Image (cartoon, rainbow, N blue to C red):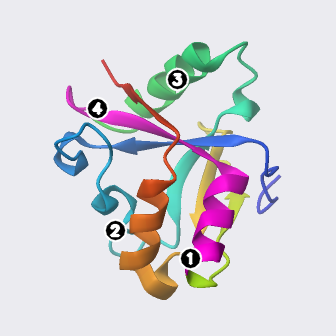
């Protein structure tokens, strides 16, 4: 449902282009900056996809994103725990970010990380620190 909070125990996946991947292979904070005019960071709600495990969830995310974006060979999919990222940002900054379901017609698992603009540079760095795992796009 539009605007519903994702469960804290669930996970999201964010597409991180190759230009926003650090030398260590992890997403740089820039991968979590809002683009001009964006109200929130777009992510995919993994559990919503109903897949039996993480590899299948990642394949489903890549399939969804490939219909919306041109996926680069060096891009990565970053996985974030909803509760973990919210708690990390709150602990370090006092800001509360929200992860809400933002379904789109061709992407029912689409969601958003809201309220990152309050201190975007710091919050993006903290989100990057909270990445639990990354997966290649190809």
Q: Is residue 74 above or below residue 131?
A: above
**Quarter of the image holding residue 92?**
bottom right
Mark 1 to mark 3: distance in Å?
29 Å
Residue 115 seen from this side: no
Mark closer to the observer (4, 3): 3
Image coordinates for residue 38, horizontal then vertical, percent: 44, 70
Mark closer to the observer (4, 1): 1
Q: Are marks 1 and 2 in contact (CB under 8 Å)?
A: no
Task: From the viewer's perspective, tell me whether residue 66 is left or right of residue 118.
Answer: left
Mark closer to the observer (1, 2): 1
Tell me the residue that label 4 is attached to: 71
**Quarter of the image holding residue 47?**
top right
Q: Which residues are magenta?
A: 71-92
Q: Which mark is residue 35?
A: 2
Task: From the viewer's perspective, tell me whether residue 8 is left or right of residue 134.
Answer: right
Identify the residue shown where x is 67% and y is 77%. Answer: 96
Residue 44 seen from this side: yes
Image coordinates for residue 113, horizontal then vertical, percent: 59, 62
Identify the residue shown where x is 75% and y is 34%. Answer: 48
Mark 4 to mark 3: distance in Å?
14 Å
Identify the residue shown where x is 68% and y is 39%. Answer: 108
Indicate the secondary structure of the residue bearing disc 2.
loop
Q: Which mark is residue 92?
A: 1
Mark 3 to mark 2: distance in Å?
24 Å
Q: Earlier in the sequence, mark 4 or mark 3?
A: 3
Mark 4 to mark 1: distance in Å?
33 Å
Q: Which mark is residue 58?
A: 3
């Amino acid at each position: 449902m539009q605007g519903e909070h994702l469960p804290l125990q669930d996970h999201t996946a964010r597409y991180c282009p190759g230009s926003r991947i650090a030398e260590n292979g992890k997403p740089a904070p820039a991968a979590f900056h809002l683009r001009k005019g964006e109200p929130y960071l777009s992510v995919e709600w993994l559990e919503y996809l109903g897949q039996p495990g993480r590899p299948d969830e990642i394949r489903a995310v890549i399939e969804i994103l490939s219909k919306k974006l041109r996926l680069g060979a060096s891009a990565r999919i970053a996985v974030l725990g909803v509760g973990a990222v919210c708690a990390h940002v709150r602990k370090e900054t006092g800001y509360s970010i929200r992860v809400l379901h933002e379904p789109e017609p061709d992407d029912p698992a689409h969601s958003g990380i809201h309220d990152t603009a309050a201190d975007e540079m710091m919050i993006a760095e903290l989100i990057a620190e909270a990445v639990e795992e990354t997966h290649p796009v190809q």
